[in-house]
Amino acid sequence: MNELISNSIDLLKDLIEIESYSFNEDKTGNRIEKWFISKDIEFKRNKNNVFAFNKFYDSKKPTILLNSHHDTVKPNKGYKNDPFNSKIENGKLYGLGSNDAGGALVSLIAVFTYYYNRQDLKYNLIILASAEEECSGENGIASIIPILPKIDFAIIGEPTLMKMAIAERGLIVFDLKIEGTSSHAAHENDNNPIIKSIKVLNWINNLKFEKTSNFLGKVKVTVTQIKSGNQHNVVPSELELVLDVRVNDCYTNKEIYDILKMNAPCQIIPRSLNLNSSSISTNHPIVLAANKLEIQKYGSPTLSDQSKISFPSTKIGPGDSLRSHSADEYIYINEINNAIPQYIKLLNKIL
């Protein structure tokens, strides 16, 4: 176990030092392949997604997917450290992608390796190191699920402080447009889209969705952008708003869209309806196993690859979501040291 943990930390250090922005994860994919080769594990690759089945895969058994991603966002301008230098200081491993989601990824790869040669498993295991998570790209997990066997449930590795997210908010971004009449500011104009936006903003402010989730609370609606006009003396012909809607597990994205477009006092267009909320039954075997280990459960406000899959899933991993996309990102070495045996204890309850 100690060697496996040490090897996984070495893998993470190597991954940090390889640029792997979304759509350009080929080199980190190569490094993950080297792990499987060194452990005599057969693997497959589709574009920049690398995946493997346990050695004694049996199509008659149910299957668990272990998944995390190896792409990163670009480093923000607040970095003082080199984002590609995987240095360790005071128990912290620094570097871009260390926390989101490198720590979870290498931990799950280590866990899969631990179980790979076992013949007595009640479930099959598939490990998937996926691409394009940060940008919800079409060549990420969504492109792989159709070519995999039936998945009964998934464990998605993201930084959750090893708490178990048994529900996750979905996301819809809406573009709203308010049309008016352009004119010189010196003339009367009763069709000014900026004035008309008051009605729209009041409508948004008063929106209420009846269903409240036990773990995610209410649907959250937020105006995040507003744009109109470019000259002080010209009434613009239109005003544009951006609406960010975080959906709980009581609604599908399409249901939210249907509700909004029915009453919207302006044009409203969703950018995508594909990033749905997710949840797993509190009576699911993996949740009951977490109960036995006294793992804390919660509802996650942040989006992950759970939004791209239709089968039950839970999200759990080392690291802290608050560090994700932050300057001088880091993960504690002890978080990985503890996560790997914790994952194994969790799976041992059902395997």
Image (spheres, helix red, strand yellow):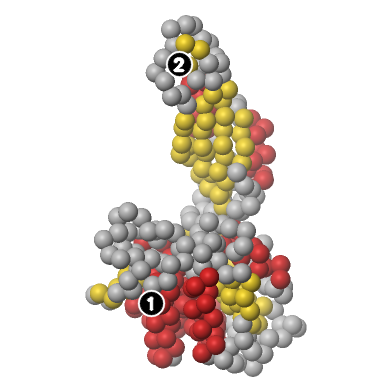
Report x, y in % for residue 105: 48, 74
Q: How many marks?
A: 2
Q: Nearer the viewer, residue 112 or 232?
A: 232
Q: Are marks 2 and 1 in contact (CB under 8 Å)?
A: no
The quadrant of the image that shows the C terminus is: bottom right
Q: Amino acid under label 2?
A: Val
Q: Earlier in the sequence, mark 2 or mark 1?
A: 1
What's the residue at 60%, 53% (across, down)? 275
Can you see residue 10?
yes
Report x, y in % for residue 24: 51, 64
Where residue 234 is drawn, which disc sits there?
2
The quadrant holding residue 140 is bottom right
Q: Which residue sits furthest left?
A: 90
Q: Amino acid under label 1?
A: Lys
Q: Nearer the viewer, residue 19 or 321?
A: 19
Report x, y in % for residue 98: 39, 70
Where residue 318 is drawn, which disc sits there?
none
The quadrant holding residue 269 is top right
Can you see residue 69?
no
SS at mark 2 in the image:
strand
Report x, y in % for residue 342: 45, 80
Up the image or down, 254 lies above or below 151; here it is above
What's the residue at 33%, 73% (across, down)? 86
For marks 2 and 1, give the CA distance.
56 Å
Up the image or down, 33 lies above or below 229; here it is below
Query: Which residue has dot 1 on it?
Result: 13
Q: Nearer the viewer, residue 43 or 350?
A: 43
In this rendering, position of residue 183 left or right of residue 280: left
